[in-house]
Image: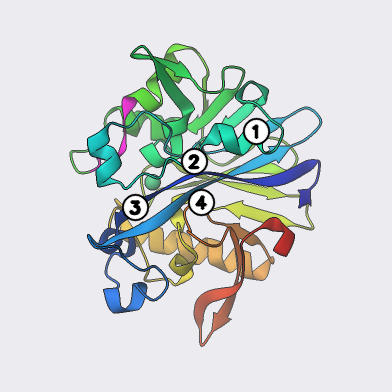
Amino acid sequence: MKIGKYKLGIINSGSFGLDGGAMFGIIPKPLWQKTNPADDVNRVRLATRNLLLESDSKKIIIDTGMGSKWDEKSKNIYAIDEMLSMNSALESKGLKAEDITDVFLTHLHFDHTGGSTFSVNAKYQPAFPNAKYYVQKQNYEWAINPSDRDRGSYIKENFQPLMDEGLLKFTNGNSMFDDEIEFLVINGHTFGQQMIKISDGINTILFCSDLMPFISHISLPYIMGYDLQPLVTLEEKLKYLKLALDENWKLFFGHDPDFAVATVKKLNERYAVDKSFRTFDET
Ligand SMILES: [Zn+2]
């Protein structure tokens, strides 16, 4: 798929598991388990699916997945699947970590920026040494001083080394990166999350990150228990689902275990999945 000067590619950098109840908030399990079956300790599968944007001068990735810095205890808690990795996914596209020019971090939760650094002899290094990393200033400020409720989601080793090396660049509110790429700020899931909209006026895709991690979250009451401000998430979903419907956007899903892209429709006044796609080739 191409939008403007960018060729879009999917990077499958891994998968892991989180509690199904937390992923679906108030939704009863008999409903959510139809699309997202739970394992024996009630975890559902999440992909870490990243987006690659390639132009003549830029090689951009959006989010970096879980990374490789996990101890055995955490690997068990989060059922981390190490069969996939960012580097092997990039290799399959003919790229190396050194080729990446820019990394857009939607937010600094560990499953979105874990792959931004790696450790050698207990020293943390940027995984993409030639890239600038972009995050909202508001999210960085929350990440270094989170609440006691969400402290476990922000692990400093995943972003502080970028700051120390001078590679972390702050975005401030909604803004354009270039002619095609726009950062859109939302605050329901955490403070200062940025979605990435890529559009050439004809085709538009929205990397909706943790506004809607799975395609089943297109349904309005499907809101994660993790969200700090669930009613704000609801307002944000209403705003962006309406835009997606009216302007025929495609939505890109970072965590859905099966589908990378979906379109939306209205059915009996409710938002629902219209078409869903595993790859860009199917779209
Ligand atoms: Zn998150």
- Where in the figure is residue 222, as x and y percent of width and height? 37, 68
Q: Which residue is mark 3?
A: 17
Q: Residue at x 36, y 11 (%)?
A: 121
- Which mark sits nearer the N-terminus, 1 or 2? 1
Cβ of mark 2 under 8 Å from ligand 1: the answer is yes
Identified by mark 4, the residue type is: Gly
- Where in the figure is residue 116, as x and y percent of width and height? 48, 28
Q: Which residue is mark 2?
A: 106
Marks 1 and 2: CB-CB under 8 Å?
Answer: no
| Foreground: disc 3 or disc 2 | 3
Is 239 contained in the magenta span? no
Q: CA distance from mark 1 to mark 3?
A: 25 Å
Cβ of mark 4 under 8 Å from ligand 1: the answer is no
- Where in the figure is residue 196, as x and y percent of width and height? 59, 45
Q: Residue at x 44, y 66 (%)?
A: 217
Q: Which residue is mark 4?
A: 254
Q: CA distance from mark 1 to mark 2?
A: 23 Å
